[in-house]
Image (cartoon, rainbow, N blue to C red):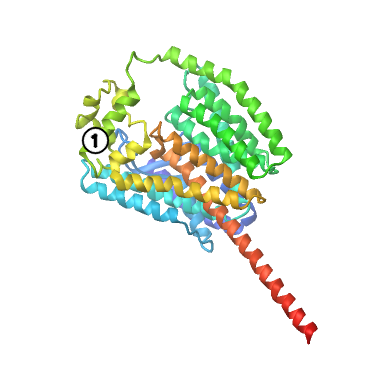
Amino acid sequence: MKWVFLLFAIATVPALMSWLRGNPQRAPLVWTAMALLPFVMDPWHLKAAPISWAMWPGYVKGMEVTLLDTSALAIVFTYTNVRVRSPIFAILAALILISLVTMAYSAVPMAAFFYAWQLARIALLVAAFAKICHDDRGPAALIRGMSLGLCVQAGFTIQQYLKGWSQTPGTFDHQNLLGMVTHFVVFPALAIFLAGGKSRAPLLGILATPVVAILGASRATLGLIGGGIAVLLFLSIVRRATSRKSTIAGLSLIGLLAMVPLAQSSLQNRFERKPLVGNYDERAAFNRAAKMAIADHPMGLGANQYVVAANVQGYSDRAGVIWNSGSRSANVHNTYLLVRAETGFLGLAAFIALLLTPMMIAFRAAWANRMDPRGDLMLGLGVCLAVVSIHCFYEWVFVHYSVQMMFAMATGMIIGIARQISLAQSKVRKRGKTRKRADGMVEVHETV
């Protein structure tokens, strides 16, 4: 069956290219569908792996290909006239190279290759979304797709809650995955809504957020979404105050306060059903195991194999990680420690650069273009990446493909919008120079 899907996915490349070239005015429909795909990938089985290690305990379980990958390939081939240049591609190339190098000394080289393959697909997605966002219609189409996708997840979480689940993951593998994915929707959606866009789709994403966050009952997700929204509202008003922003900010803060009892009730329900075990601090035990591995392997254990190494080499044992399948098959709950343990200092440096570079581009563009609505969206994307960077101290899931798809979308939007703004400013400067030359010619003529 997987080979049938792979043939279908490959066939979509020329078919989609032909459709996009023949229907440029309807291209936003495809872009919206692409932004929706990460939210329906698993329930609709829109992926396959020519090489599959289904039982591998790492976060990449094979050499996967998804319908989003082939759609991105079609976008890249269709919009060949749109150039995308950014230091982010060099950073991604460095991460891919570092992951491939770890194959030389890791216990399971193929597992490291799987992660390098995933990063290559992420680079493809970044290029595709950047090309989409060179078009003025691109960002709105992507936010529409993400908002609809989060509404789908809200529906699944409600269904799971009614069935008695204490923490609802939607269609994702874990509620923490869904929680981090939610960051990539709510902050750009709120930013574009504050700016006064005509579309009502962002409002759907904003309204779906508390449903997903509260029913997921993740402390980090709840705290970071609440805090991030407050920061975004404050920065947006400081950047450029309007009566609309002030009204929405007031209503949002009232809404956040109203959600506090619901969030507390959800967390209480979670810990009543799954109480903490005595004085055992699992996160601290994971951290100890990771730090032992880092001390013994300064160049890293090898990408995508922390779980195996932590168990086989005895780090989990010595760190006091309890014996059960959930704990012994989990990664350290800190992305920075995980990346450092697997790919060494160079891998960690490249990973931090990958997070900081688009964030800095977004904040710089937002503050330098206070009168431009696109600057509002860049502010939302910057806050999103800042929140995700903080969340990485408490979760490992950033290395999961589900989250990296969303990161690619946000990063591609930042690259594309920054290019839009740069081209617009270049045109303004050229018009200014043309006017000056024309005025000079008139003055010379009058003098003569």
The image shows residue 255, relative to residue 412, as above or below, that is above
Instruction: Looking at the picture, tell me which residue is in the foreground, 306 or 438.
Output: 438
Residue lying at 61% horizontally and 26% vertically, measured from the top left: 256
Residue lying farthest to the bottom in this orientation: 448
Instruction: Looking at the picture, tell me which residue is in the foreground, 231 or 335.
Output: 231
**Image quadrant where residue 348 sits:** top left
Q: Which residue is mark 1?
A: 293
Q: Quadrant of the N terminus?
A: top left
Residue 226 visible in rendering? yes
Left or right position of 202 against 343: right
Residue type at mark 1: give it: Ala
Relative image position of residue 22 (x, y in whole percent): 60, 58
> Badge 1 local density, few (<14 within 10 Å), some, or many (20+)?
many
Relative image position of residue 403 (x, y in whole percent): 45, 39
**Image quadrant where residue 234 sits:** top right
Residue 304 visible in rendering? no
Residue lying at 55% horizontally and 38% vertically, measured from the top left: 185
Residue lying farthest to the front in this orientation: 447
Q: Secondary structure at mark 1?
A: helix
**Image quadrant where residue 236 sits:** top right
Relative image position of residue 295 (x, y in whole percent): 23, 37
Relative image position of residue 54 (x, y in whole percent): 32, 35
Left or right position of 12 against 296: right
Left or right position of 89 against 340: right
Residue lying at 63% horizontally and 44% vertically, measured from the top left: 239
Instruction: Looking at the picture, tell me which residue is in the foreground, 440 or 421.
Output: 440
Q: Quadrant of the C terminus?
A: bottom right
Instruction: Looking at the picture, tell me which residue is in the foreground, 91 or 407.
Output: 91
